[in-house]
Image (spheres, grey):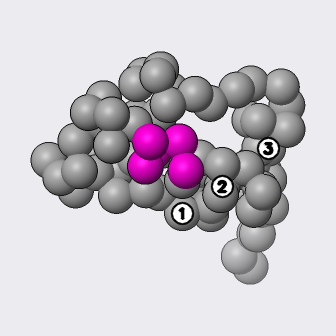
Amino acid sequence: MAEFYRKKKKVCQMCAGKTVDYKDADIIKRYVSADKAKILPRRVTGTCSEHQRHVANEVKKARFMGILPFVK
């Protein structure tokens, strides 16, 4: 018989107390794909919907300021 296991639910890092700021490129790179520099979805990053919108805005700010590239 096949044994099934439950995957551990990802916890939103911002709800846990960490912050995301567009000036900190190392943190923002976690929310952007490596190959095409696309914003990663919630199911991959584990953020809640409120904070995913915040992350998207911070990534867009960082791109506009030249901290992150639009395309790799």
Residue shown at 59%/47% (left/top)? 55
Q: How many marks overall? A: 3
* Left or right side of 25 for 44: right
Label 3: how many Cα within 10 Å (few below 14, some 14–19, many 20+): few
Residue shown at 33%/34% (left/top)? 65
Q: Given the image, on which type of amino acid does mark 3 rest?
A: Val
What percent of the width, then of the height, locates residue 58? Answer: 53, 42
What's the distance in space between the residues labelled 1 and 2, CA to CA? 8 Å
Label 2: how many Cα within 10 Å (few below 14, some 14–19, many 20+): many
Which residue corresponds to mark 3? 11
Range covered by the magenta-colored residues = 57-61
Main secondary-structure element of the magenta-colored stretch: helix
Q: Is residue 30 above or below residue 70?
A: above
What percent of the width, then of the height, locates residue 68? Answer: 29, 36
What percent of the width, then of the height, locates residue 56? Answer: 54, 53
Q: Quadrant of the N terminus?
A: bottom right
